[in-house]
Image: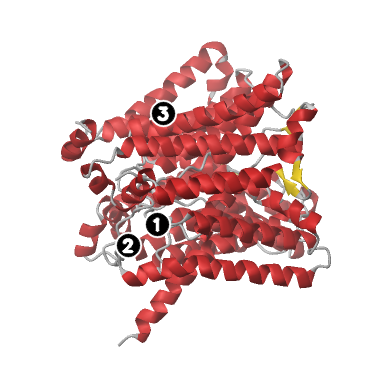
């Protein structure tokens, strides 16, 4: 009963067992299907615009998804466990504002980074406290903190902006490791590997799946459900803090409206990656491919001069489409059977 | 006794009174009847949308697309008005309600027929609707001088001392009061949210009821779309941006359980009025309007924590103690 809006019991619909072979096959092939889509988009893009196939342009394109994907990995674990965090974009705003504030008191680059990550962790702990200690539904809590965190940024900044970050701070969002490979790409790869191992190779990862499939069963099999969920909220907060450092460093300024609507894109990325929004299944490789798909789509559309708000239509359609299509497919298959 | 004085609503009404008294102690003008009428009029769109959202939340769903629906309908009727200034207002209103209901029906079908979680559906349609506003308007504004005088005058028109906008809210409240308590649809909404399994056995189609809840919410968003655009005499892509959160906040503060099945018309209205009073009081007591967002966020958290404590039933004690001893 943690989140009734997501796990609504609909008695007239059969919820397939996760161990069922047919369902397993669908999810197994999801990443393959997604990879095919990514390749198709890549090919279409390289035909649609002559500027697409350039190492530097493609390198720039990765900025479209690296920051979001960092959060998406943590969000994937959270959604698999049956919770959700809609406040991630607001955590970025608050962490960025805190860094900007510290800058006014003469903080250097290391302090700025520590402050950004700490604020992220604190926000995650705040969400986690409400959800796991008070036992409130995560969707309401994070809708509340979504307003609260960004609200605090607005109180501090109003319609002002913090600028003048030190030159060394810009390394995170604008720096290059080697040739066209950016610092953010390196972070993205490291974080992806860490989360891949965490979810697929550790007891903790198994616990996350167990909780998502049956929280009560997980509890009675000795998993500390509340503690695991709290850690997941902490991780999501921390990742938002890292994303805040990267984004602030890249933009070189902080406004309270920073990263508005990013929570939607992060959730879309996770769902597109094959993570079941109701919890219990999903993989990190799926989210990685989904990140590339979304990055390529937005970059390709950007090259064709499609405005950002029209791109958001595609994101919205993608979000609904990726969930609706397999279900339509299954319904059609059901109907064909005698 | 408790049957006649619902506890949660009484506490909320008390909180609003205390708030008003606190403001009145320093700024007596705020509680003058004419100003209170202004505050109510200003809160009317929130009240109307909160009632629609209440119906959706009661059925265990959530509608995050209301503000985008409002903005799209508002832009559509504004553009219709610009191209056909002669179109009578009742027709405009009918179009607005119909457009809103269609958008609600899209949400409803996806939830009912495809069983997609409502939060995903409405997050998606929220961005799609906003994007469509940009497509149909080309990002341009529709300004007051382009709208016909009748179009912008309607919500301001006074009847018995109150503007039409306020009357719309009052009539909606009355209709919802009757609908939720006296009609089969109203009762089935509570049944679906309270216990979907039992609802099925009593012959209620859960998915269909959720569908109609979305249609109701959409229709009210459409109606509010016209009232909003005509009242402020401007339509652009970002009108009512983020308003869906305020609407959900009003419901949560009003004691409507996000788990479904628990809530009342009075609660939703009081929740909306609470936010309306806070919003209107901020400039009076000289606090920057930038506080509004943080205050409504805190109000959501406090309200949901408070309601969860109050609503904790004895039926779940076994699980709770198991969780406590882990």
Residue A28 lies, in percent from the top left, at 43, 67
Task: Name the mark nearer the viewer: 2 or 3.
Answer: 2
- Circle 3: element type: helix
Image marks 2 and 3: residues in contact by CB distance under 8 Å: no
The residue drawn where x is 42% and y is 33% is A128
Identify the mark nearer the N-term, 2 or 1: 2
Q: Which of the two residues, A164 or B251, is positioned nearer the viewer here?
A: A164
Residue A74 lies, in percent from the top left, at 50, 44
For label 1, the residue is A281
Subunit ID for the residue under disc 3: B
Subunit ID for the residue under disc 1: A
Horizontal placement of A46 versus B45: left or right? right
Residues at marks 2 and 3 on the same chain: no
Does residue A40 appear in the picture of this structure?
Answer: yes
- Figure check: A338 above or below A296: below
Q: Which of the two residues, B42 or A298, is positioned nearer the viewer here?
A: A298
Residue A181 lies, in percent from the top left, at 73, 49
Mark 3 to mark 1 CA distance (whole Å):
33 Å
Does residue B162 appear in the picture of this structure?
Answer: no
Q: Which of the two residues, B80 or B252, is positioned nearer the viewer here?
A: B252
- Circle 2: element type: loop
Task: Name the mark nearer the viewer: 3 or 1.
Answer: 1
For label 2, the residue is A18
Query: In the picture, which quadrant includes the C terminus of chain B?
Result: top left
Mark 2 to mark 1 CA distance (whole Å):
8 Å
What numbered label is drawn on residue B302? 3
The residue drawn where x is 26% and y is 63% is A11
Q: Residues within 10 Å of mark 3 (few under 14, many from 20)?
A: some
């Amino acid at each position: 009963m943690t989140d009734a809006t997501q796990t609504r019991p609909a008695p007239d619909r059969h919820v397939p067992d996760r161990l069922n072979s047919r369902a397993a096959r669908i999810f197994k092939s999801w990443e393959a299907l997604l990879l095919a889509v990514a390749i198709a988009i890549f090919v279409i893009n390289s035909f649609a615009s002559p500027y697409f196939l350039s190492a530097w342009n493609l390198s720039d394109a990765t900025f479209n998804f690296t920051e979001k994907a960092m959060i998406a990995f943590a969000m994937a674990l959270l959604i698999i466990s049956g919770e959700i965090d809609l406040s991630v974009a607001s955590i970025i705003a608050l962490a960025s504002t805190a860094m900007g504030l510290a800058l006014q008191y003469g903080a250097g680059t290391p302090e700025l980074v520590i402050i950004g990550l700490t604020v992220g962790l604190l926000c995650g702990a705040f969400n986690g406290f409400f959800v796991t200690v008070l036992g409130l539904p995560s969707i309401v809590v994070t809708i509340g903190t979504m307003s609260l965190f960004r609200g605090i940024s607005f109180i501090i900044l109003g319609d002002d902006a913090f600028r003048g970050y030190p030159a060394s701070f810009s390394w995170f969002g604008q720096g290059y490791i080697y040739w066209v490979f950016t610092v953010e790409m390196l972070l993205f790869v490291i974080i992806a590997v860490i989360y891949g191992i965490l979810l697929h190779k550790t007891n903790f990862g198994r616990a996350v799946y167990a909780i998502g499939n049956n929280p009560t069963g997980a509890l009675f099999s000795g998993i500390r459900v509340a503690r695991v969920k709290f850690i997941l909220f902490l991780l999501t907060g921390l990742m938002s803090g890292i994303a805040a450092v990267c984004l602030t460093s890249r933009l070189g300024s902080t406004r309270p409206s920073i990263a508005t609507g990013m929570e939607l894109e992060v959730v879309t990325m996770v769902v597109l990656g094959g993570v079941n929004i109701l919890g219990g299944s999903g993989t990190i490789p799926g989210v990685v491919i989904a990140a590339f798909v979304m990055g390529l789509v937005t970059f390709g559309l950007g090259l064709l001069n499609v405005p950002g708000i029209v791109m958001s239509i595609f994101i919205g359609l993608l979000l609904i489409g990726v969930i609706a299509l397999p279900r339509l497919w299954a319904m059609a298959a059901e109907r064909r059977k005698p | 006794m408790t049957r006649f004085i619902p506890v949660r609503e009484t506490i909320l009404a008390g909180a609003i009174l205390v708030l008003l008294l606190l403001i009145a102690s320093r700024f007596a003008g705020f509680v003058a009847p004419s100003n209170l009428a202004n505050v109510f009029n200003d809160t009317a769109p929130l009240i109307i949308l909160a009632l629609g959202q209440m119906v959706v939340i009661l059925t265990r769903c959530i509608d995050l697309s209301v503000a985008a629906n409002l903005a799209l309908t508002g832009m559509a009727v504004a553009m219709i008005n610009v191209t056909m200034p002669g179109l009578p207002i009742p027709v405009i209103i009918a179009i607005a309600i119909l457009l809103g209901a269609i958008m609600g029906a899209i949400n409803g079908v996806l939830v009912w027929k495809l069983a997609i979680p409502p939060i995903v559906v409405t997050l998606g349609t929220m961005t799609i609707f906003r994007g469509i506003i940009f497509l149909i308007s080309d990002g341009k504004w529709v300004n007051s001088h382009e709208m016909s005088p009748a179009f912008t005058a309607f919500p301001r028109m006074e009847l018995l001392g109150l503007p039409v906008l306020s009357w719309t809210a009052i009539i909606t409240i009355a209709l919802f009061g009757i609908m939720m308590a006296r009609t089969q649809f109203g009762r089935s909404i509570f049944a679906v949210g309270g216990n979907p399994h039992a609802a099925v056995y009593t012959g209620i189609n859960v998915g269909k009821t959720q569908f109609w809840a979305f249609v109701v919410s959409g229709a009210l968003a459409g109606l509010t779309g016209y009232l909003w655009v005509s009242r402020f005499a401007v339509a652009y892509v970002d009108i009512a941006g983020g308003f869906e959160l305020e609407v959900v906040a009003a419901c949560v503060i009003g004691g409507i359980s996000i788990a479904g099945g628990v809530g009342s018309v009075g609660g939703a209205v009081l929740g909306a009025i609470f936010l309306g009073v806070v919003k209107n009081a901020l400039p009076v007591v000289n606090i920057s309007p930038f506080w509004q967002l943080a205050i409504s966020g805190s109000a959501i958290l406090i309200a949901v924590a408070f309601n969860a404590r109050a609503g904790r039933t004895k039926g779940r004690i076994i699980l709770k103690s198991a969780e406590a001893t882990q």
